[in-house]
Amino acid sequence: MTTDTSERGLERLICKALTGDPCDPPSGRTVSEPTPGYGGVGWSPGNGRDYNREYCVDLVQLQAFLHATQPDSAPALRLGEDCPARRKFLARLQGEINKRGTIDVLRHGVRHGPDHLELFHGTPSAGNETARRLFELNRFTVTRQLRYSRDETQRALDIGLFINGLPVFTFELKNNLTKQTVHDAVSQYETDRNPREPLFRLGRCVAHFAVDESEIRFCTHLKGKSSWFLPFNRGRNQGAGNPPNPDGLKIEYLWREVLPRESLTDIIENYAQMLTPKDARTGRKKRVQIWPRYQQLDVVRRLLDDAKRHGAGKRYLIQHSAGSGKSFSIAWLAHQMIPLKKDGSPVFDSIIVVTDRRILDKQIRDTIKQYAQVGSTVGHAERSGDLRRFIEQGKKIIITTIQKFPFILDEIGSGHRDRAFAIIIDEAHSSQGGKTAGAVSAALGEGDGEDGDESYEDRINDEIERRKMLDNASYFAFTATPKNKTLELFGEPDPQSDGTVRRLPFHTYSMKQAIQEGFILDVLEHYTPVESYYRLAKTVEEDPEYDVRKAGKKLRRYVEGHEHAIRLKAEIMVDHFHEQVLAQHRIGGKARAMVVTNGIERAIQYFHAIRDYLKERRSPHEALVAFSGEHDYGGGRVSEASLNGLPSSKIADTFREDPYRFLVCADKFQTGYDEPLLHTMYVDKTLAGIRAVQTLSRLNRSHPEKRDVFVLDFLNDAETITKAFSDYYRTTVLSDETDPNRLHDLMADLDGAQVYAPDRVRAFVKLYLDGAERTQLDPILDGCVAAYLKELDEDEQVRFKGSAKAFTRAYAFLSSILPYNNLDWEERSIFLNFLIPKLPAPEEPDLSKGILERIDMDSYRVEKHKVREIILEDEDAEIDPVRTGEGGGRGEIETDRLSAIIDEFNDRFGGIEWGDPDRVIRTATEDIPAAVAKDARFKNARRNSDSENARVESDKALQRAVLAMMQDDTRLFKRFSDDADFRRWLSEAAFQLACEATD
């Protein structure tokens, strides 16, 4: 017999993997009860003929479970016969499922008459034999070709999975070998499965799976063609799909890892949820059923398993892209850490979640609410003493913000070495290193010593220990874009053969996979750089010298911020949005645009320019502006609230409503802002590195009607943006650990400058730790400042101050992770942190001052390049460790003549063609008429003769004016000489404008 490669063969294969039997449907009706759990991964074959289509239950399995586990209550239900008692119970069960969902009914059972009926027995605790026996009585069954439809069509599903007679999953299978894929299975659910059927109503089944032999997708709420099927794949090469399996099908993890009895019970108990969120704007509630995606299930289980094996004291970095569902992952992790045990004792006494996201706070509460009283489990630490009080009250999960966390913890004075902590950090970056990590450690460590006989060395060692990562705390850091400090603090060590030690994330869900799976959009797919062309001209006769580097920066800012340039770019933005976004009905006509600017003044300029042009176009749409504080503009003080006419707190919500379509930003809404309606971004701000990734990623949030996004960039090039995103497209790896020996080198350089003496450093630190008055500390510092000014020349001063800053930064970071203490480093760190602010910076004259008063913008235009898709390299990115080299140092100032600076600037950034339409119009309508109007013969004819003679003199003056600019404007001169129509137009225009000027 040949291999069965049909869809039926795939059904049999999956059923055999689950039950040990192909589960072929019986030829006739049976009322016999199949033997449970005799093969596979603990499932038994079911019989489709036992399925009641009206109430959506397998009556034989439900009756068997209730009689085996609740023999006193089950007989009264009379499930074996069609009678009023059975119908009454089944109607009650169906009503509870419709109201609460199958997940909650399995967890908590139902009350019926005088009885409370359990419908599922969960994971038994260790050593509890009664609970173990009840768990084994659960009936996990598989039914092939499940006829679910109540009409005459008798439609059937490929596979239905039941727990104790209640349906939990449905499966539609397809087979690549017969030229059908998972997408055909999805299409079958969308078009051929009526969502009004009782089996497909929200909450009846936990999830519906579309499966072929390579991929899996699932949906928790069937809504016809609006059904959202999410991937449930492991990921291949850090992208979508599944890797090859040398021992079987690519999707074997489904029945090997996910569907075994113990695993599925864990998911039902700890992950699957029915939530009822309320829309903050409308106040409406809607039910949402949650089933974990594969990477969420995988990361939480791996973290729990590792923490259980190793106990407290480890550090974990989780690099999960936007769109990975980090909020749910963190909530599930925090909840399941509460009962986690090692050798019979809790692994963690308290779980501290550090986040600034309100949605994460809510999801943790919603998760806990399913299992326990939120008030007795979760606390919010917002002020001094909160954390200590919550720990003493036994609250297990404590939520605080990144800003408040170190200050709250710093004032806890009681000892906590006898407790173990899990610290979950949401969006961890380098702010969690150095001083912040030190405050965390100080608060969760021993606190202030009570021994009054402590020596100086004891106290300095205490200062060192306060900053170290604690061995009684595990750190779980979640981020999409790990910096080098984050990797070094939390990454997994990976020693190399050459002696370097790379650092890797513990778990990765890459940006590449999130894009390919459709959870976020690719913001680089339609990236369009816009190049500016302009020409500057001198407005003074003299030719002074200026600092070339600073002058270049000032000139670029001047040009891009010039009123004419802002207006032109604003018109491009508004026209593009109306013609290419709104006219194309992007996001169902609901698309929004963000304008990212280089500063507050630029944002206000753009806001006015966009608002004015929208009115000129008679567009129904309006703009909002976002910036911090108040700013001087137009002779008065303005704020975002005064310009918008609404409170700052309402900008985000108002932006979602019509008529607002443009949001002009200056350093606001560029990180952590999730607005699915945001489709287009206009960038007029220099971006690079992680800031470029975070800013452009505001566009990537998915929406059911969102198919693409668009970036129009006026300041950056594709190469810069490509480099920025390449670091985070796949796994980010730290190439090597920071070399602590550089601290020895820096300390030697600082000591060698002889600004301070080591004994004076120690004296200062001892006085400081003893709580001495400022009058005792400042003389030591002032003496060092005097030596700094007297003994060091300007370059040496710059080098010393730069090295001191580099030392304190590097030590603040390294002191939290090094396994050993160094008294000299700690002393110098304390001392230098006080000395640095007192060291005056050498005076450096601004040799570019005054340049803007001596130039004017001669012409400006922009040219939109072809839309391009940026393709990122499909490889892991290595980033360098934290720099510990000396900072500072001042290079030679290069000066040049103003004319040469302008020429070079125009050559590098201009490239203006002399036939530029802007310049032609400006020359024809301003410069030439002005020259004609000033011509003595023309003015005499206007005063003393008729219009005919005035026109003759005007044409002669025009000839002279055009001839005078021949060297500068050869194209204009050639056009005037060769093109009769252009010559007639220019002659007429010049005459009319010159006459107006002399009237």
Image (cartoon, rainbow, N blue to C red):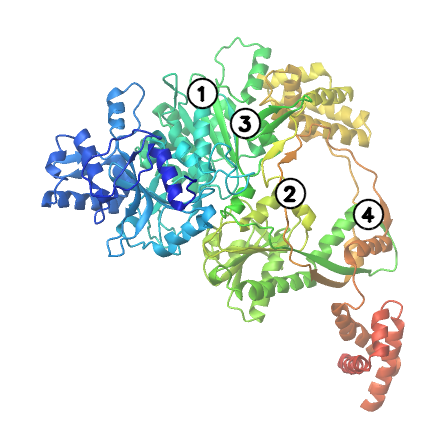
Residue type indicated by callout 3: Ala
| Other residues around mark 4 within 10 Å, as few (<14) / some (14–19) / many (≥20) | many
Residue mark closest to the camera, 1 vs 3: 1
Above or below, comparing residue 439 to residue 229 in the picture = above
Residue mark closest to the camera, 4 vs 1: 1
Residue type indicated by callout 1: Arg
| Rendered residue at 73%/21% (across/down) | 745
Q: Nearer the viewer, residue 309 or 596?
A: 309
Q: Is residue 765 left or right of residue 132?
A: right
On-image quarter of the N terminus: top left
Residue mark closest to the camera, 4 vs 2: 2
Q: Position of residue 231 (x, y in %)?
A: 45, 44
Disc number at residue 437? 3
**Gap between marks 1 and 3, in whole Å?**
25 Å
Above or below, comparing residue 804 to residue 959 in the picture = above
Identify the element where label 4 is drawn.
Answer: helix
Tell me the residue that label 2 is attached to: 873
Q: Earlier in the sequence, mark 1 or mark 3?
A: 1
Q: Position of residue 483 (x, y in %)?
A: 60, 35
Q: Is residue 228 left or right of residue 621?
A: left
